[in-house]
Amino acid sequence: MSVPHEALDFERPSIFRRIQLRDWAYFALMVATGVIAYSLYGHMMDRYDVGGLILAVVASSWMGWFWRPWQAYSIIVGSLALFSIWMYGDDLTRGETNFWLNYIGSGQAGVMWMSVMLYLATAAYVMGLFSSSTFPSRAGAAFAWVGSGAGLMALLVRWREIYLTDPSWGYIPVANLYEVFILLALMTTLMYLYYESRTGQRTMGAFVMLVIAASVTFLLWYAYDRGAAEIEPLVPALNSWWMKIHVPTNFVGYGGFAIAAMLGVAYLVKHRFERTRPDAPITHRLPSKDALDSVMYKAIAIGFAFFTIATVLGAMWAAEAWGGYWTWDPKETWSLILWLTYASWLHMRFTKGWRGPVMAWWAIIGLFVTTFTFLGVNMFLSGLHSYGEL
Amino acid sequence: MSNNDQAATTGTVPASRQKTARKPRRSRILVDFMGSMSLAITLLVALAIASVIGTVLVQNEPYTEYLMDFGPFWHEIFAGMGLYQVYSATWFLLVVGFLVVSTSFCVYRQSPGLLKDLRRYNLQVKEKSLLSFHSSAAGDLDQPQDEFVQHAHRVLKAQGFKAREKNSDGQTVIAAMRGRWNRMGYLLTHVGIVVICVGALADGTTLLKINEWLGNLEIETRSVPISEVPRSAWIPEWNPSFRGSVEIPEGASANVVFLPMREGYFVQELPFRIELEEFRIERFSTGAESSYESDLIIHDPDRDEPLRHTISVNHPLIYKGFAIYQASFADGGTRLDIDAIPLGAEALRELEVPGRVFQEMDIPTPDGNTRTIEFINFQVENVIQLLNEEGVRENRHMGPSFDFRLMDRTGHGLYYRNYKRPALQEGAMYFLSGVRESPADEFHYLFLPADADDSLDRFRTYLAMLHKPEVRNEIARQVARDDETVPNEQTQAIASTTAELMGLFAQGGYTAVHNEIERRVPAERLDDVRDLMIRILHAGLQGLYMEVLQDEGVVSIQEEEQRFLEDTISAINAISLYQSPFFFHLKDFEHREASGLQIARAPGQSTVYTGSVMLIVGIFLLFYVSYQRLWIIARRREDGQGTHVTMAGTSNRHKVEFEERFAHLKRWIIDQQNADDGQKTTGSNTNKND
C-alpha cells in the first residue's frame, strides 16, 4: 500500500482509495459482461432473473475487490466456459466430435479434470506435510486452483448443455446430487484456498483436501456406477427461481463446516504431536493451534451464517411450494439439528470461551451431522426432499 | 445467553457491575436460572433429540400402520407420548416454549448491560489497570500533552473509533470504542429467535388443541361422507391459522378443507368455494412431468364475478390471506369402457362393463357365479425407464392403464393392473396385465399376444376353440391321422389322448397335465412317458393353431406365427395362475382427474420472516463486526519535558487480528511512525465495519 511520506498512514483510506486500477477494470468487466448478457438475453428474463444478474455482477465485483485472486480465477474460468459454449454452438453432438469439448471443455470432461486435479492436490499437500520443502504444498495449491476452476467451468458449461439437450428443460445445474457434489468440491476447495492465502498456512491443505478428495470419490462412483451425469429434465417441485439461491448458499455452509471439521482433525493431530513428539519436524510444520483454532472459527462462522440464510431461503421456498414455511420435513428437521449443533458450538466459544480439543471434536462430529443432513436424510428417511435420492 | 461475554470483553476494567456482591433476591435467582447458558444448552439438546425422533419415526401415518409396526403395547406408549406427531406434541411445544422464555430472560438480563456498553465509555480507568491488559503499551513522548491528545484523537477518528475525553489533575483520559453494532448483533439474534418462535407458535395447532381440550372440538376418525361428519369436528371460518388439504375432482367444488389431527381430522370451513375446472399434467418430450396445473374458479359471495386462476407447483394463489397450493393429484372418477373377455369357451363373447374409478360392480361369470370388481385407479400415461441393449437408459411409453381388484363373495381377491395398449416386448406385441396379492407386492405379468392388427382376436379365437371339447376331438383326430409315424391301429388311442391332454391344458395349464400324467404312470416310466405326452399335446395345440390360421386365411407359417403360438401356449398356461375368469380389456375411457389442493392460512408468516431477517443480520454483526475498546491516558512526564502515555485495548472477537491492529495503533499513537509496510492493516475482517 502506498503511503505518503509526509503523513502517517493511519488515515484509513476510503474503500475507493484502496481499490486500484485493476480492481476498477475488473468491475468494469463485470458490468460489461452483465450488460452484454442483458442485451442478448434480456427479453427472456423476468424481474427475478434481472435481479439475479445484477446480484451476480455486484457479488463477483465485490469478491474480486475483497480477494484479488478471484479476479483472475473468474476471468479465466468464465472465458473457458464461454469458449466451450461457443464451440458447442447449438449442436450438443459436438461434445463428442470436437477435440476441445471432448477432452477439456465439456461438462463431463471438466468434471474429470476437476477430479484429477483435486486428487493431485490432495497428494501434493499430503507430501508437503512430510517434506521439508514447500514445493509440494505450493504445487498442491496450484492443482487445487486448477481443479476448482475446472469444476466451476464444468458446471457453467453443463448449464448450457442442459439447454442444448432440450431448451424446454433449461435449469441451473444444482438440481441433483451429481451436480451439487461438483459444487461442493469446487466451493470447498475455493473457500480453503481463501483461508490459505489469508493465513499462509499451506499444511492445512493436507487435511482439508482429504475430505474434498472423499467427495470427489463419491462423485466419480455416482457418475460411473449410477450414470448420474446424465442430463434429465427437472421435476416440477424444483422448477423455481429459489433453487438458484437456496442450493449454492447451502453449499457455502456445508463447505465451511467441512473445512472446520478437517481443521479440527489437524488441531487434534497437532495437539497430540506436541505432547508425544514435540521435536518432530512435522509437529513444527503444522500450523499453531491458535492459527488452526482461528481458521476453524472463521470457517464455522461463515458456514453458519450462510447455512442460516440457506435455511431461511429454504423456508421461504417451502412456503411457496409446499404450503408452509416449516413442515418438519426430515430435511428441514435435520437442518435444524445441524443449526443447533453449530449454534451450541458458537455459544460455547463466545460465552464460555471454550477452545481446544473439545471444540475440535465438536467440529468433527458436526461434519457427521452435516453429512447426514446432506446425504443421510435422502438415503434413509423419506420426505419432500426425495429428489436427491441415490 | 452470553452472560460471560461482557466479563471477557471488558477485562479488568473496574466494572460498574459489582451488584452481584449483594445478597441475591429470589426473583433474581429465577431470572439467572431461566437465562442461564446451561438451561439453554440443555433445552437445545432436548430439542435436537426430539427432532431426531421425529425424523426416524415416520410422522402422521395412519394409526393402523403404527399398530402393525410396533404391536399394541408399544403403539399405546408411542401414541400416548405423542411420538407420531412429535412436532405438535404438548411436551415438544413446552420445550420450545421454555427455550423462548429462557432466551427472553437472557435478553432481558443482558440488555441493560449491553445498552450500557454502547453508551458508557468508562473514563475512570487507571494507568495501572491499563497495563494489566493483554494488549497494552506505554511510552514517553517529547510532544506536549495537548498536542499529543489532538494527535491521538485524529488517529482514533481515522481508525473509526468514537472517543470521549476527560481531563482532571492534569491527566487526560481518552476512552474509545468501535464496532458497537456487534452488541446489537447479540440482541438481534436472540430477539430474532424469540420472534420466529412466537410467529411459528401462532401458526401452529395450539389453538385447536386448546379448543379440543375445552371440549369445543372433537376429531373425526371415521372415513365418512362430509355430510355425516358431526358438527363437533367442524371448525368455523374464524380459525386464523391452519393447513389442510382437499381433493376436488374436475367439475366439482369444495368449500372445506380437512385438517389432519392425530388419528383423525377436522373439517375447516372456508369463506369461499373452490371449483376445479381442469387439472393438467404437462410433460417433457421424455414423458417426465414438467408441471402440474389446476384451473380454479373461486366463488366468493364478496365478489361480483368468480375469480379464475391457474395454480401450479411453486405458484400458489393467495386469496384473502388463504394460500392455495397445488399439492397432489388423483383420479377424479374416470369413466372406463371395458370389454370383459371370458378366459374360456366364451372368449369371443363381448361383455361390456361400464366402469368408473372408485366404483364397484358385480359381474356374472360364465360358471354362474358373481365376482365384484372394484376400480381403484387410472393412469393416463405410464412411462417406465429401461436399459436398452447399449446399456443406455430409455423411456418407454406404456400408455394408459387401470388398476382394479376382483373379489369373490367372501371379499377376497387379487389386485390387477391392465394396460390399454399392447406393448413391445422382445420384438413382439403383448397386452399386459399385472397381478399381485397385495398392493405392497410386485406385479407378475400375464402376456397376451397381440395379433398383426394389435388386437386380441386371434388369441381369443384360439382360446375359445381350445375350450370346446368337440373342436379338441376333431383336431386331435386330424392330427393323429395326418401323422405318418403313427400306426393306423393306434390312431384312435393317440387322438383321444391328444384331446384329453388338450382339455387338461385348457383347464389348468402344464401343471394339470403333469399332475394327470403322474397320477396315471408308474414312477419308473415317468420321464419317458412325460416327454411323449408333451409332444403329443404340442402336436394337438399346433394342429388347432393351423385350423385357426386356416380360418383366417393365412397359408404359410412364418417365424412370427410360430412365435405367436408359443406365446399363446405360455399365456394359456399362465391363465390358471391369473385367477380371474376375465381379461378386462380397456377399450375407451373418459379421463377425469382430481386435484389435491393444500390450503393454508399462516398469519405468523411475516412475523417469522421478520425474525429470520433479524437473526441473519444479527449473525453477521456478531461475526463480522468486532467490538473494540481502547483507553489512552496521557499526563505530563515526571521530568516535565513531554508526555507519558499509557494505552490499552480489548476486543471480543478476532483476538489475533486485534493484537495486530493494536500494534499498529501503538506505532501511530505512541511511536508516531508508519505501520510496517506490507502489513495487512486493511482488508481483513476487522476493518469492514463502522
Image (cartoon, coloured by chain):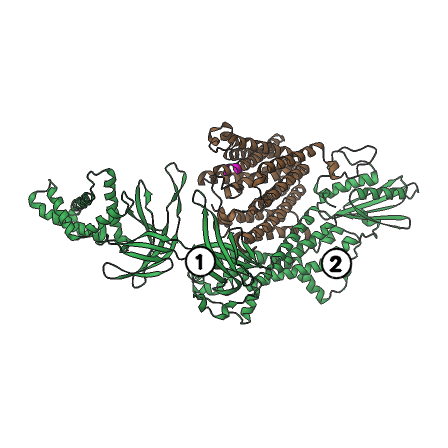
Chain colours: A brown, B green
Q: Which residue is pictured at 63% across the width and 32% down the height? A: A72
Is residue B229 visible in this depiction of the protein? yes
The tag on residue B105 is none
Instruction: Determine whether B504 is above or below B677 in the image.
Output: below
Residue type at numbered disc 1 = Gly
Q: Which residue is pictured at 36% across the width and 58% down the height? A: B356
Instruction: Provide the secondary structure element on which disc 1 rests.
Output: loop
Q: Earlier in the sequence, mark 1 or mark 2?
A: 2
Is residue A280 visible in this depiction of the protein? no
Residue B382 rendering spot, x and y as whole percentages: 39, 48
Q: Quadrant of residue A294?
A: top right
The tag on residue B112 is 2
Residue topped by disc 1: B251
Residue type at numbered disc 2 = Pro
Instruction: Determine whether A78 is above or below A335 in the image.
Output: above
Outermost residue, bottom direction? B215
Name the dominant secondary structure of the magenta segment. helix
Task: Name the subunit of mark 2.
Answer: B
Front position in the image: B162 or A285: B162
Region in magenta: A158-162
Residue B606 rendering spot, x and y as whole percentages: 62, 56
